[in-house]
Image: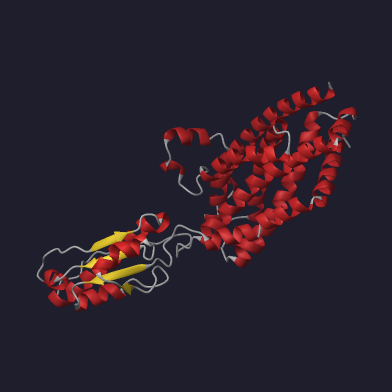
Amino acid sequence: MNPHLRNVLELGRKEFVALARDRVLVVLIIYAFTVLIYVTATATGIELRNASIAFVDEDASTLSARLIDAPQPPYFQHPARISNAEIDAAQDAGRYTFVVDIPPDFQADVLAGRQPTLQVNVDATAMSQAGIGANYLQQIFSAEIAEFAGRRRAVPIEPVTQVVRVAFNPNLRMPWFLGPMMIINSITLLSIVLTGAAMIREREQGTLEHLLVLPLTPIEIMLAKVWATATVIVVASALAVTLMIHGVLGVPSRGSLALFLSAAFIYSCSVAAIGIFLATIARSMPQLGLLAIPVVFPMGMLSGGSTPLDSMPLAVQWVMQFSPSTHFTAVMQAILYRGAGFAVIWPQFALMLAIGTLFFAIAAHRLRATLARAAD
């Protein structure tokens, strides 16, 4: 066997042993790929769910009763009835996200062909529900009013209707999106933390000096830590997709799991190089944690998973093309959501390899300088 390859393999085996002895990191890996995925997918989300709503019925008509009964769970809680004087106090106290005021003679105005208005008071501090809920209420009330007026006035139904078919996730359930996206965030975080912690552990325990006297090169040291970390991440990702995404959350997958894990390995190697670079700057684990924050969060938030890349400013879109998370997010969505094969996503594979090689070269240069100072 080539001596350089043997060195890389033996050093990688050492990384496995060191990681197995670090119970904190082992618990972190298990938590990130199980509990964190489940909690994020099921307990959070931006869809409307269980929103509190109250009505002020100043009309007391058949139509107003229908409007009050229209918002139903799971989108809204059971509607409450309050008086006009209670609106401000109720919303200031945060009791209701939506308060709908039905004015007097509302039904009479609708039947007379006039265009009366409903007042919808929205607590905009509930940001995730305010805008979506207001649109939901508009659609619900419009449908109820149109059906009521059509029956009373024999309004003909339009001959053309719009039918929307959702190719993936037909019920638009947020856990189906948040679960896979959380895997990307976990891979990003742990690839940086594991490699960075491994480098800092070498320095704190004095084993870095031992490596310097051995016939090893900085590239061999880096490759060992990168492939060991990526292997752990890929195994954890495979278990997360199989057990958590498919099993617990029930999210279907259309593409190849092997292809997804291949992309995850390349992405983890790219991000691990960033972790080594940060470890050459940080002098302790707390410093590494602080340095990782401004790296991990932008990579996750601006990768196109939470917000489409096209809706971001052009400058941000251009900068994020140099982040491997952007291309890995596109690969993940193409494989798991749309069942794409390698013939479709090979450009993203090539870009991840190119960006990873660039980060690896930068980290290697920085590591050489660090080891040279340590030798002196």
For this orientation, the residue located farthest to the bottom is: 62
From the viewer's perspective, tell me whether residue 129 is left or right of residue 250. left
Residue drawn at x 72%, y 31% is: 280
182 in relation to 358, above or below: below
218 in relation to 50, above or below: above
Looking at the image, what colour scheme do you see?
Answer: secondary structure
Query: At which x and y percent is residue 260?
Result: 63, 51
Query: At which x and y percent is residue 40?
Result: 56, 58
Between 287 and 195, the one lying in front of the other is 287
251 in relation to 323, above or below: below
Residue drawn at x 34%, y 62% is: 91
Residue drawn at x 22%, y 66% is: 159
Residue drawn at x 21%, y 70% is: 145
In the rendered image, which quarter contains the N terminus? top right
Between 370 and 331, the one lying in front of the other is 370
Query: At which x and y percent is residue 79?
Result: 34, 73
Between 30 and 303, the one lying in front of the other is 30
Q: Quadrant of residue 199?
A: top right
Residue 181 visible (yes or no): yes
Query: At which x and y percent is residue 54?
Result: 32, 69
Number of numbered tags placed on the structure image? 0
In the rendered image, which quarter contains the C terminus? top right
For this orientation, the residue located farthest to the left is: 112
Q: Quadrant of residue 201?
A: top right
Q: Quadrant of residue 38?
A: bottom right
Residue 163 visible (yes or no): no
